[in-house]
Amino acid sequence: MFFEGYGYHGTSFEQSYRCYPASFIEKPQIESGDKIIMPPSALDRLASLHIDYPMLFELQNAAAARVSHCGVLEFIAEEGMIYMPYWMMENLLLQEGDIVRVKNVTLPKGSYVKLQPHTKDFLDISNPKAMSVFNFIHQFVFS
């Protein structure tokens, strides 16, 4: 079995789980986000470690040599399972029930971003410096 239960030791969290899309537990709100749902035992283990907050994780599909990062929304999944947005499963080349390795990580905080517009629509913004990065990205990437 891939889930090793409470028998782990050390100062970091690393565990294998079977992954399923969030639609399996009727949590459509996480489909557009970057957070996963983990089992309660993961919270028990994480609480005993000295980890940085917010909790961030590296997801690894070793079979396809794919890696991504995410946060956690809740600890309500069945033991041995995690639920994640379907887009994240596609990005990691995972199918329902595939094994994914979850490891806690600390990522460096960004201090600078430089965006380059790909269309002339950027020129229609009356004051681009006043627009937040989030609104800018949302307006031009997701529209």
Image: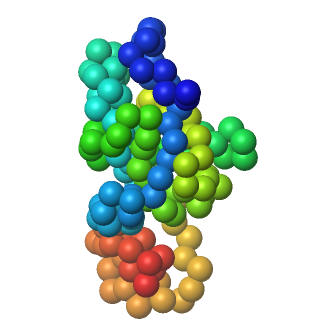
Q: Residue 27 location, x and y as percent? A: 30, 61
Between residues 24 and 57, which one lies in front from this camera angle?
A: 24
The answer to whether one can see residue 105 in this image is no
Residue plotted at (33% across, 86% down): 126
Which residue extends farthest top? 9
Colour option used: rainbow
Q: Quadrant of the N terminus?
A: top right
| Residue 104 occupies quadrant | top left
Q: Quadrant of residue 90?
A: bottom right
Residue furthest out toward the front:
1
Q: Residue 109 versus residue 105: which sits nearer the camera?
A: 105
- Residue at the (51%, 57%) spot, across then down: 88
Q: Is residue 121 above or below residue 130?
A: below
Quadrant assignment for the C terminus: bottom left
Taking 46 as reference, is 70 above or below it? Answer: below
Indicate the position of residue 17 as horizontal and vertical percent values: 50, 36
Q: Residue at x 33, y 57 (%)?
A: 25
Residue depicted at x 61% and y 53%: 94
Q: Does 131 sit left or right of 96 as displayed?
A: left
Q: Is residue 29 left or right of residue 101?
A: left
